[in-house]
């Protein structure tokens, strides 16, 4: 069963005749963990915003569950790189704000219980509920942002370079957390994860889509079989992963060279 269908999607910003995305067609199936990979500025985040219903195609049609996307939806949760938390609200209040939209009939005490449980799922103590974002590390803020999205139980998780601003150790921990949450779900959520890091894409995804230089289209679409997945320790020693990494590097570099992008 597919979640998304992209049919000849092109996009340019208002009052601009410069295409960012050009004639993209693909489908994303339910339960896939898709990493969209490409050089900075190639339109990856723009594509994610289209999937989220925050922007709309200039040309073509974009479907979610076979219905044309006309707006944002709680069924498509978004985690941004900048956390997206209101600084004047505690971590718990940020989560409850989202929960109020999903569960309008529930009492405040019930929403608080859901928020605390969501924090626990991402490895945070219940005390974080009453903590302002400025008193949390970047990694903890990103955990809160993930908890906020997961709390409303979206069908799809859209992640826009969520760990790009974090240090290497924290980034690895949150990569592992994301995989753990995805793997242990009885019904796997569909995840679309934006990154420019080839190793991150290989480690997380069971499918890697590579966008070429702007105006972008898909220059590679590679599925990674479950039997080929490796743990973090084997990521740089496994022969198949080394070959895949080199192939992706060559594809990206060839596209840059052909388009003469600096």
Image: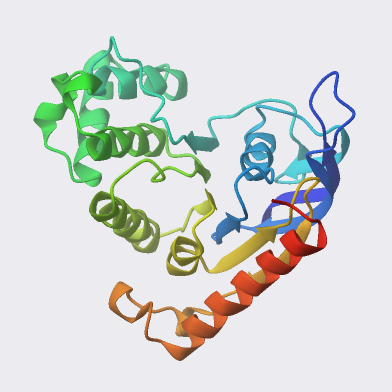
Q: Quadrant of residue 125?
A: top left
Does residue 11 appear left or right of residue 174 in this picture? right
Viewer-side residue, 227 vs 88: 88
Does residue 96 appear left or right of residue 10 in this picture? left
Q: Is residue 96 above or below residue 193?
A: above
The residue furthest top is 88
Q: Position of residue 142 (x, y in %)?
A: 32, 37
Q: Is residue 223 above or below residue 10?
A: below
Q: Position of residue 242 (x, y in %)?
A: 48, 82
Do we see residue 225 in this rendering? yes
Q: Is residue 84 above or below residue 67?
A: above
Viewer-side residue, 51 vs 68: 51
What residue do we see at 77% from left, 30% from top? Answer: 56
Q: Is residue 1 above or below residue 165?
A: below
What residue do we see at 38% from left, 39% from top? Answer: 150
Q: Quadrant of residue 38?
A: bottom right
What residue do we see at 44% from left, 61% from top? Answer: 200
What residue do we see at 30% from left, 14% from top? Answer: 87
Q: Position of residue 223 (x, y in %)?
A: 61, 73
Does residue 112 appear left or right of residue 226 in this picture? left
Q: Position of residue 155 (x, y in %)?
A: 52, 44
Does residue 158 appear left or right of residue 233 in this picture? right
Q: Quadrant of the N terminus?
A: bottom right
Q: Quadrant of residue 69?
A: top right
């Amino acid at each position: 069963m597919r979640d998304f269908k992209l049919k000849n999607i092109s996009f340019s910003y208002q009052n601009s005749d410069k295409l960012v995305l050009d004639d993209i067609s693909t489908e994303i199936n339910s339960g896939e963990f898709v990493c969209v990979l490409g050089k900075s500025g190639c339109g990856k985040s723009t594509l994610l915003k289209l999937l989220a219903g925050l922007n709309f195609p200039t040309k073509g049609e974009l479907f979610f569950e076979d219905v044309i996307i006309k707006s944002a939806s709680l069924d498509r949760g978004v985690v941004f790189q900048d956390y997206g938390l209101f600084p004047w609200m505690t971590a718990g209040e940020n989560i409850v704000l989202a929960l109020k939209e999903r569960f309008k009939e529930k009492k405040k005490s019930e929403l608080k219980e859901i928020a605390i449980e969501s924090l626990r799922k991402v490895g945070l103590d219940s005390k974080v509920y009453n903590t302002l974002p400025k008193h949390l590390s970047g990694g903890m803020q990103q955990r809160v942002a993930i908890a906020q999205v997961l709390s409303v139980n979206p069908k799809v998780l859209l992640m826009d370079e969520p760990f790009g601003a974090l240090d290497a150790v924290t980034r690895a921990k949150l990569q592992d957390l994301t995989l753990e949450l995805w793997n242990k779900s009885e019904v796997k959520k569909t995840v679309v994860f934006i990154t420019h890091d080839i190793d991150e894409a290989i480690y997380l995804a069971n499918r890697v889509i590579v966008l070429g230089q702007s105006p972008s289209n898909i220059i590679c679409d590679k599925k990674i079989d479950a039997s080929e997945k490796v743990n973090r320790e084997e990521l740089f020693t496994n022969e198949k992963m080394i070959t895949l990494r080199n192939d992706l590097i060559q594809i990206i570099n060839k596209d840059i060279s052909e388009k003469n992008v600096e």
